[in-house]
Structures are given as structure tokens and as C-alpha cells.
């Protein structure tokens, strides 16, 4: 089965695709308003999920973990903990540390995307010692 493409909608006539609506809802859950995230970045996040799930569309439960880690990177530790609690903060921090140690995987891709989109908080970069090779 071929993978469906994502759609941003057009002039209010054609709606956003289900995958982008699911990501928007998941971002809201973690206190990151979707309008603060450029559409291209959201499309990249959705494509990371689609790549991970092969020919199948990502299930609804696949979106919140992606949104949580991305929100942590974008909001920073304090704002993320305030909105989501200390347990969610600790989990996100562990995920970033594991992604950096492993160097690949969807969590590493999310951290890299947030960095290249210039959305990652400097505090997160410093806390985790994130260094991106620019060469």
C-alpha cells in the first residue's frame, strides 16, 4: 500500500491531512501551540514518523512521544516541566541523553531537527552538551 502524502490544505477548501492534525493535537497536549512551529518542521516530524512505520500510516499513539520530545527541545526544561510535570521532564531528558549516546534513531532525528530549525532552547543544548557537526 502506498503511503499517502501530507496536506496543509488550500484556501480553506481542502483540509489538513489527518497526520498533520494528529501532530498538531499532540503538540497542544504538551503545551506547544502548533502555530509556533513552521509547517515545514511539522511536515518533517510527520515524515520521520512515516519513515519509522514503513508502509503503514503511523497509529494515533505514535504522535505524543514525538510531540513530547520536540516540545521539550523547543520550550526548554522549565517551561516543559511547568506544563507537563517533573516526570515528563525527566523522561524527555533521558530520551535526549540516550539519543545522543546512540547517535541515531527517531529521538536523535527529533533533536537534530529542532537544532537545524533553530528552535531548540540554548538551555537544552547546554544541559545535554549537544554538539552538531556542521561540516
Image (cartoon, rainbow, N blue to C red):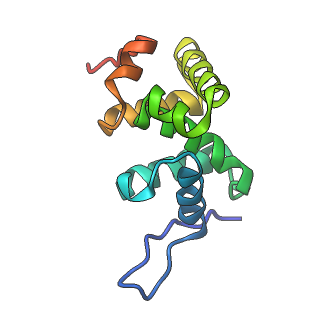
Residue at horizontal 50 percent and vertical 73 percent from the top:
16
Using residue 107 as the reference point, say whether residue 59 is left or right of it.
right
Using residue 135 as the reference point, say whether residue 12 is left or right of it.
right
Residue at horizontal 62 percent and vertical 62 percent from the top:
3
Q: Relative to residue 52, is residue 59 depicted above or below?
A: below
Residue at horizontal 62 percent and vertical 21 percent from the top:
90
Image quarter in which the N terminus is found:
bottom right
Nearer-the-camera pick, 33 or 12: 33
Nearer-the-camera pick, 1 or 77: 77
Q: Relative to residue 85, is residue 122 depicted above or below?
A: above
Residue at horizontal 32 percent and vertical 23 percent from the top:
122
Q: Relative to residue 96, is residue 16 depicted above or below?
A: below
Q: Position of residue 119 (x, y in %)?
A: 34, 38
Q: Position of residue 43 (x, y in %)?
A: 45, 55
Q: Given the current orientation, which residue lies at the most extreme bottom position?
A: 13
Using residue 56 as the reference point, say whether residue 82 is left or right of it.
left
Nearer-the-camera pick, 59 or 70: 70
Image quarter in which the C terminus is found:
top left
Quadrant assignment, res 12: bottom left
Quadrant assignment, res 107: top right
Q: Position of residue 67 (x, y in %)?
A: 56, 44
Amino acid at each position: 500500500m502506498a503511503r499517502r502524502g501530507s496536506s496543509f490544505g488550500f484556501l480553506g477548501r481542502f483540509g489538513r491531512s489527518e497526520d498533520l492534525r494528529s501532530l498538531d493535537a499532540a503538540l497542544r497536549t504538551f503545551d506547544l501551540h502548533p502555530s509556533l512551529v513552521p509547517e515545514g518542521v511539522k511536515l518533517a516530524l510527520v515524515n520521520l514518523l512515516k519513515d519509522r512505520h514503513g508502509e503503514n500510516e503511523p497509529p494515533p499513539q505514535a504522535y505524543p512521544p514525538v510531540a513530547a520530545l520536540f516540545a521539550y527541545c523547543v520550550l526548554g526544561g522549565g517551561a516543559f516541566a511547568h506544563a507537563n510535570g517533573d516526570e515528563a521532564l525527566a523522561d524527555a531528558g533521558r530520551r535526549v541523553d540516550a539519543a545522543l549516546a546512540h547517535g541515531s534513531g527517531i529521538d536523535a532525528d527529533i533533536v537534530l531537527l529542532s537544532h537545524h530549525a533553530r528552535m531548540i532552547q540554548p538551555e537544552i543544548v547546554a544541559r545535554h552538551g549537544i554538539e552538531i557537526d556542521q561540516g
